[in-house]
Image (cartoon, rainbow, N blue to C red):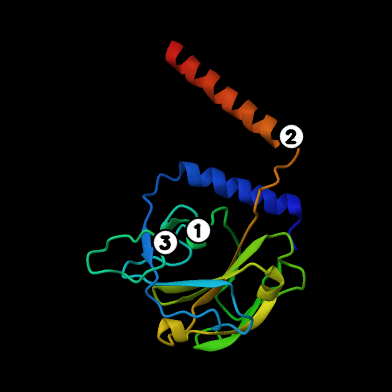
């Protein structure tokens, strides 16, 4: 299991990359018929999208894209309930994924039933304790459904099904987590300040030469 420092570092790197990616934010509509009871342990909320473009939960940006809980309207307008960040939350970091019948090394994530329409998942107890919120993402074809867990222990194991994705075969299951407030490691702000100052000095040198 990752240490708190390792997870914090991942979170900081993710946030830094968000600021420099330059990728145009997309808008996602809650087109899939998902239910909080799709999984054995009922989630706090769910969001599912049918995507005509070749994107999936590895390419959609859960932090900077817009997520509209209403179904897609004919004119593709965005409802007043739309939020930046899925479920109105940001700070999500990718934690683990299984796309074949194997167990991952970091949290022991195992998924049974891949390439089928239902199955189970489980991981090492306590693997998600460092997070405030956790998201389980099911991917089938070009479509995905995300399930939000505010009680992170409920996301450690359960039964899944793809009824909200037209019973398509599951290609992979991913796990994302977020902190309410990201605890920066001691000395990191000073390091980032030094890096920023170094960049400014370098730009000045370039202008002089």
Q: Position of residue 3 (x, y in %)?
A: 76, 56
**Quick one: label 3 or label 1, which is nearer the N terminus?**
3
Quadrant of res 136:
bottom right
Give the side of residue 126 with respect to residue 163, left or right.
right
Q: CA distance from mark 2 to mark 3?
A: 35 Å
Give the vertical position of 151 relative to 191 (above or below).
below
Q: Which residue is mark 2?
A: 187
Q: Which residue is mark 3?
A: 67
Q: Position of residue 172 (x, y in %)?
A: 52, 75
Q: Position of residue 112 (x, y in %)?
A: 61, 85
Q: Which labelled disc corresponds to residue 116?
A: none
**Can residue 35 be seen by looking at this rendering?**
yes
Q: Which labelled disc corresponds to residue 88?
A: 1
Q: Nearer the viewer, mark 2 or mark 3?
A: 3
**Quick one: label 1 or label 2, which is nearer the N terminus?**
1
Residue under the point 44% across and 57% down: 83
């Amino acid at each position: 299991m990752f240490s708190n420092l390792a997870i914090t570092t991942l979170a900081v790197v993710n946030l830094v990359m968000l600021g420099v990616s330059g990728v145009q934010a997309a808008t996602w509509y809650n087109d899939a018929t998902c239910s909080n009871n799709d999984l054995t342990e009922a989630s706090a909320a769910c969001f599912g999208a049918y995507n005509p473009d070749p994107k999936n939960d590895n390419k959609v940006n859960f932090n900077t894209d817009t997520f509209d809980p209403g179904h897609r309207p004919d004119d593709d307008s965005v409802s007043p309930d739309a939020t930046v960040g899925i479920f109105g939350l940001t700070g999500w970091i990718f934690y683990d994924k299984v796309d074949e019948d194997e167990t991952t090394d970091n949290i022991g994530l195992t998924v049974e039933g891949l390439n089928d329409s239902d199955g189970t998942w489980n991981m090492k107890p306590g693997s998600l304790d460092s997070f405030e919120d956790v998201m389980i993402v099911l991917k089938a074809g070009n479509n995905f459904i995300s399930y939000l867990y505010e009680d992170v222990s409920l996301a450690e194991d359960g039964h899944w099904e793809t009824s909200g994705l037209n019973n398509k075969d599951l290609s992979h299951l991913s796990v994302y987590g977020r902190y309410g407030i990201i605890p920066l490691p001691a000395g990191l702000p000073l390091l980032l300040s030094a890096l920023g100052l170094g960049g400014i000095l370098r730009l000045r040198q370039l202008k002089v030469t």
